[in-house]
Image: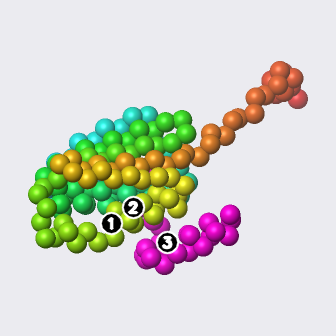
Amino acid sequence: RDALADVRVLLTELRHTQEAGPQPGLNDLDALLDSMRDSGLALEVREFGDRGRLTESRELALYRIVQESLTNALRHGDGAATLELEWGEQAVDLVVTNGSLAETPESKDRGHGIDGMRERASLAGGELSVHEGAVFRVRARLLLEARVAEPAESADELVTAGAPA
C-alpha cells in the first residue's frame, strides 16, 4: 500500500507541475477568495467550524479544488458562486455551487479540470463528486488529522509541581 501511495504521489507530481517553493494552503485561502471577487465573481462564502488540522498535502488539495471550482464558475458559470466549508470532527466538506450557462463550444472542450480535482482529492485520501446541470456543484470531502489527546497529569504530578524545591 505504501509503495502504491508513493507511485500515485509521483504520478501526480509529474502531471501537476508545481513551481518550486512553498505551496498554497489554508493561510492563502482568503487571498484566493478576494482574488476571485476582484476578477468579477459574485462570491458568497459560508464557513462552519474551526479551520485546521489538515496535512500539508490535504491543504494543497483543498486550495487547488477551491481554485479550480471557482475558476470554472467564473469562466463557464453565470457570474455568481457559493463556497461552503464545513469543518467537522473527522473531515472538512467543501461545496462550490454556481448556475451554469447554456452550453457553448468552449464548454464542450472541458480540459482536465474536473479530472484533476478528482485526482487531487483521491490522492489526499478524500473524495470528490460533480453534479452538472442548470446548477453546477462540486462536492469534496477531505479527512482531517486526528486530534492528539494531551496526556492528563496525575494528582501526584500536580502536587509535586506545586511543591517548593
Closer to the camera in the image, 125 or 54: 125
| In-image side of 91 versus 93 (left or right) | right
Q: Report how far apart the C-alphas of labels 3 and 2 lie in the structure.
A: 11 Å
Residue 56 shows in the view:
yes
* Mark 3 / mark 1, whichever is N-terminal: 3
**Gap in Å between the C-alphas at discs 1 and 2?**
6 Å
Question: Which residue matches tag 3?
Answer: 12
- Magenta residues span 1-28
Q: Position of residue 49 (x, y in %)?
A: 44, 34
Residue linked to disc 1: 113
Q: Answer with the quarter of the image where residue 77 lies.
A: bottom left
Residue visible at 64% across and 68% down in the picture: 4
Dot 1 and dot 2 residues touching (CB under 8 Å):
yes
As drawn, the label of residue 117 is 2
Q: Residue at x 13, y 61 (%)?
A: 103
Measured along the vertical axis of the image, is residue 39 above or below residue 108? above
Relative image position of residue 163 (x, y in whole percent):
85, 23
Crowdedness near tag 1: few (<14), some (14–19) or many (≥20) residues, C-alpha within 10 Å: some
Horizontal and vertical percent position of residue 25: 44, 57
